[in-house]
Image (spheres, grey):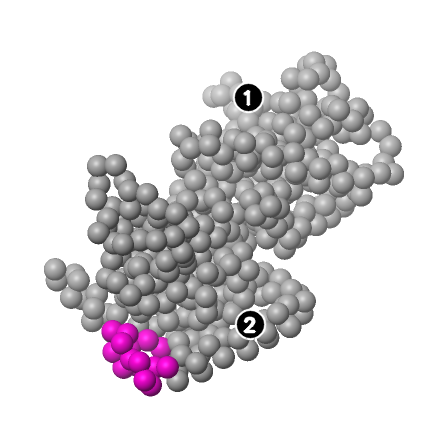
């Protein structure tokens, strides 16, 4: 199953959102929400993940070119896309019907935990890949946590904007 | 052979994932070392194209603000020109620095290694290792150029070290960004003999050949001595708001090659 037009549209919109607006926003002079992984977390689950991984890579590399960040966004986007499937398989069991599952079937709390886990993970990954200072991670963990919560608020808003009318 | 092929096919998702991660890591490693300065111009050109479109949209909303800023800068330049006639104490040779105005198209300040893109490039005689300033302070140093754009290593970059001095003295140290607030820096290696006070002004030291001596950088917020070393670590706030950059000036040091050749001979 390949991506539908809405998924591609979302990738494009979130690329623009991250580049034009969120990269330049600093809430309280410190916090910068990371929203670019939102469309990746909403991609349809597939048995054959190659298309999803390819889209994630192209999406990440484009962000890297515009931000001059080497391959930081590409590595993060690919990692999130791959681990997402592991996350679902871990939550459910092996007989879980991946292809027909929709995020909307999650209850509110399940969805927020799903978003929170991946936002938190991707922020740590971006920090480590950008700075290469592994020992300083603990000093940043508070900042990353608050940033994750702020990003989660935006994700909830995006759910309302883009998926309000969708049915599970 | 068939068994190997079967294993490969059954694990194609994982293998493809590993392949993409390796490619990403190669890109990261290339961007973190010297090789970055050698990457092709197309990357700067593509980034410049995007930034120009974004800038075209944003500039409509900031026209008045930029105009006000330019008027202020003009006023300061005229004032500096008048003062220079009577009080020329700056150790700069006549015509040593040539100034070219430019606009910041993209300004990063959320990463540890931030850069900027400006709308002037090789066709405007911009070359790497030129200093970039605003009317309020230092912005960075040109890293690489394409035809119409240049990439600047921002002072908000952990690998950037710029020579600064205490105003009206010869005591100098190095400006280093801590990676936190974009308007607060540390100055390291300032000798303890310097008579520091909170609120003192720091200016460019003029030893790097990128910037003339005496350009405003920031003011001292706090300072402390380094145990075991005869130097201060100074907490400093910049005069320029690094999160809000518009018009900037690129400085060409006409004697840089000559000065650099002497340094090499040492």
Q: Is residue B66 visible?
A: yes
Residue B28, x across and y down, in percent = 44, 43
Q: Which residues are magenta?
A: B83-98
Q: Chain of mark 2?
A: B
Quick check: marks 2 and 1 in contact, CB under 8 Å?
no
**Residue under numbered circle 2:** B69
Q: Around disc 1, counting alpha carbons within 10 Å, would you say few (fewer than 14), some (14 to 19), or many (20 or more)?
A: few
| Magenta segment main secondary structure | loop
Q: Chain of mark 1?
A: B
Residue A120, x across and y down, in percent = 59, 31
Relative to B131, is B89 above or below? below
Residue A58, x across and y down, in percent = 58, 45
Relative to A4, is B60 above or below? below
Relative to A122, is B197 above or below? below
Q: Is residue A101 visible?
A: no
Asked whether, in this view, residue B27 is left or right of residue B87, the answer is right
From the image, state whether disc 2 or disc 1 is nearer to you: 2
Q: Around disc 2, counting alpha carbons within 10 Å, would you say few (fewer than 14), some (14 to 19), or many (20 or more)?
A: some
B93 or B121, nearer to the observer = B93
Secondary element type, mark 1: helix
Q: Is residue B85 magenta?
A: yes
- Residue at point 63%, 27% (across, down): A117
- Residue at point 65%, 34% (across, down): A149
- Residue at point 60%, 34% (across, down): A146
Q: Earlier in the sequence, mark 2 or mark 1?
A: 1
**Residue under numbered circle 1:** B6
Q: Is residue A70 magenta?
A: no
Secondary element type, mark 2: helix
Relative to B164, is A64 above or below? above
Q: Quadrant of residue B25?
A: top left
Residue B81, x across and y down, in percent = 39, 83
């Amino acid at each position: 199953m390949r991506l539908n037009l809405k998924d591609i549209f979302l990738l494009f919109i979130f690329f623009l959102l991250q580049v034009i607006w969120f990269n330049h926003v600093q809430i309280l002079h410190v916090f910068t929400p990371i929203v670019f992984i939102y469309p990746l977390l909403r991609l349809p689950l597939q048995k054959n993940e190659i298309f999803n991984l390819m889209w994630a890579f192209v999406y990440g590399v484009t962000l890297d070119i515009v931000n001059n960040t080497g391959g930081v966004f590409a590595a993060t986007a690919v990692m999130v896309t791959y681990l997402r499937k592991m996350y679902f398989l871990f939550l459910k069991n092996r007989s879980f019907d991946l292809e027909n599952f929709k995020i909307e079937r999650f209850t509110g709390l399940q969805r927020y935990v799903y978003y929170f886990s991946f936002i938190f993970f991707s922020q740590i990954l971006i920090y480590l890949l950008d700075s290469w200072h592994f020992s300083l991670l603990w000093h940043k963990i508070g900042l990353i946590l608050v940033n994750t919560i702020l990003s989660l608020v935006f994700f909830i808003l995006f759910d309302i904007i883009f998926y309000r009318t969708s049915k599970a | 052979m068939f068994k190997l092929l079967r294993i490969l096919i059954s694990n194609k998702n994982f293998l493809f994932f590993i392949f993409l991660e390796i490619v990403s890591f190669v890109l990261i490693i290339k961007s973190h070392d010297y090789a970055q300065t050698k990457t092709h111009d197309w990357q700067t050109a593509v980034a410049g194209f995007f930034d120009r479109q974004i800038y075209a949209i944003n500039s409509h909303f900031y026209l008045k603000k930029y105009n006000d800023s330019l008027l202020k800068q003009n006023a300061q330049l005229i004032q500096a020109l008048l003062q220079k006639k009577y009080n020329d104490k700056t150790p700069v040779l006549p015509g040593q620095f040539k100034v070219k105005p430019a606009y910041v198209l993209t300004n990063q300040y959320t990463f540890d290694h931030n850069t900027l893109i400006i709308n002037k490039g090789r066709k405007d005689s911009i070359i790497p290792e030129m200093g970039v300033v605003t009317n309020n302070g230092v912005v960075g140093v040109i890293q690489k150029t394409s035809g119409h754009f240049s990439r600047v290593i921002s002072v908000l970059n952990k690998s950037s070290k710029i020579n600064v001095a205490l105003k009206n003295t010869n005591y100098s140290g190095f400006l280093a960004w801590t990676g936190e607030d974009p308007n607060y820096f540390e100055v390291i290696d300032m000798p303890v003999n310097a008579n520091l006070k909170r609120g003192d002004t720091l200016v460019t030291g003029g030893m790097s050949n990128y910037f003339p001596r005496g350009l405003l950088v920031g003011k001292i917020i706090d300072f402390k001595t380094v145990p075991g070393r005869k130097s201060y670590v100074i907490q400093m706030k910049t005069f320029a708001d690094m999160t809000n950059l518009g018009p900037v000036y690129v400085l060409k040091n006409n004697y840089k090659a000559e000065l650099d050749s002497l340094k090499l001979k040492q």
